[in-house]
Structures are given as C-alpha cells and as structure tokens.
Image (cartoon, grey):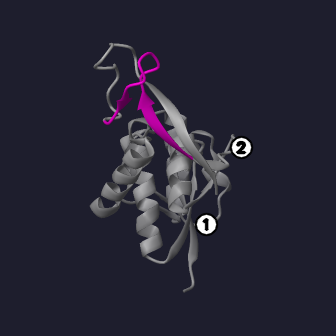
Amino acid sequence: MFKHKVFVIDAAAIFTKYVLQLTFPLYTTPQIVNEVRDKKDQEVLETIRITGRFTIRKPSEKNIRKIIGLSKDMGEFSSLSEADISILALALDLIDEGKKPVIITDDYTVQNVAKSLGLSFQPIRTRGITEIRKYIILCPACGYIAQDETMKYCPKCGHKLTKKPIKTSQA
C-alpha cells in the first residue's frame, strides 16, 4: 500500500520554530495547540496554518485507550501528559488511514512509547532514545513494588517511590 508521509508535531516543534522547516503535511491535536500560549509561538502556528498543510485533529478514543494501556504496561503512563497521549494516538489514527507518520518530539517518554509501537519519531534538539525501556515504581527503602504507578509514597514504610528501569531492549 502506498503511504503518504506526514509529520505529527509536539509543542516543542512549534516552540523551536522547527515546523517552519518541514515540507510534508503537518498534524497535531487540540491539546498541543492549547499548550501554545506565547504570542510569538502563536504567530508560528498562524504561519503554518496559512500554508494549508496543517491539520488540527482530535485522535480516536480507541487509540487513546491503546496508548494509555501500553504506557501503563511500560510504567510510562504517569510521565505522559494528555497532550503526549493525544499525539501518539493521532499517529496511530494516521497509520490506520495508510499514512506514514513521523512524530516530531524531544520528549523521551513519547519517544519510548512511540518506539515500542514501531512508530517513527524525529528529535529536534536531542539525540533521541536508542532503546525501549520499561519501568517499575519501587520503594528504595523496603523494595515494595507499586501496582499503581500514580502512587507517590510507599504504603509499607512511607518512603517516596521512584521510577526504575527494569528491562531494556535494542530496537
């Protein structure tokens, strides 16, 4: 199947003005647009809107649920914002439509979840991740492993819980 290449942009692509260098169609979500508050960044948004190659789209609930489930399995859910989840889900929607999306982001958590799904990403100012990581939420004092990654303190001893990588795989 022939695939059209498109970019799914994170807010960093707007803040850095990197979007002005991109030539393929651009997609983002209302959650990302809501993060753009600075007047100069809003001007960047308006500039790319004028090109006619920019689409703001809400992702499907089906793919939002998929991202939430996978990110929980990876121990990354608590590190993702609603905007992060939205661009990952939108990328899945675009794949379902036969497009070849590349997510433009410097966010390592977004990159980690994207890589685990086989989604392409392109960092802006960072090198980007090279391996997929899974995490657990662990008490460094007593070794308690939290089942709920949103927990902040150990129910056994009261220590602050930490996020620890448990497995890495080259991908």
At horizontal 60% and vertical 42% (from top left) the residue drawn is 106
Q: Is residue 137 magenta?
A: yes
Q: Is residue 107 visible?
A: no
Q: Tag 2 or tag 1, which sits nearer the N-term?
A: 1
Are discs 1 and 2 less than 8 Å apart at CB? no
Q: Reply above or below: 28 against 41.
A: below
Q: Is residue 160 visible?
A: yes
Instruction: Work out whether residue 91 or residue 168 is closer to the camera in this orientation and state it.
Output: 168
Instruction: Work out whether residue 89 or residue 29 is closer to the camera in this orientation and state it.
Output: 89
Instruction: Work out whether residue 130 or residue 44 is closer to the camera in this orientation and state it.
Output: 130
**Which quadrant holds the N terminus?**
bottom right
Give coordinates of residue 89: x percent, y percent: 40, 58
Which residue is tagged 2?
A: 127
Which residue is tagged 1?
A: 24
Q: Amino acid at mark 2?
A: Arg
**Which quadrant holds the C terminus?**
bottom right
At horizontal 35% and vertical 34% (from top left) the residue drawn is 149
Which residue is most to the top? 158
Instruction: Work out whether residue 40 or residue 130 is closer to the camera in this orientation and state it.
Output: 130
Q: Is residue 24 magenta?
A: no
Which residue is most to the bottom? 1
Characterize the local packing of mark 2: few (<14), some (14-19) or many (20 or more) Cα atoms within 10 angstroms.
Answer: few
Characterize the local packing of mark 1: few (<14), some (14-19) or many (20 or more) Cα atoms within 10 angstroms.
Answer: some
* Left or right of residue 96: residue 167: right
Specify the segment rendered in magenta: 133-147
Q: Find the distance from the CA under tag 1 to the CA under tag 2.
A: 22 Å
Give coordinates of residue 134: x percent, y percent: 50, 44
Secondary structure of residue under mark 1 = loop
At horizontal 65% and vertical 58% (from top left) the residue drawn is 22
Give coordinates of residue 81: x percent, y percent: 40, 39
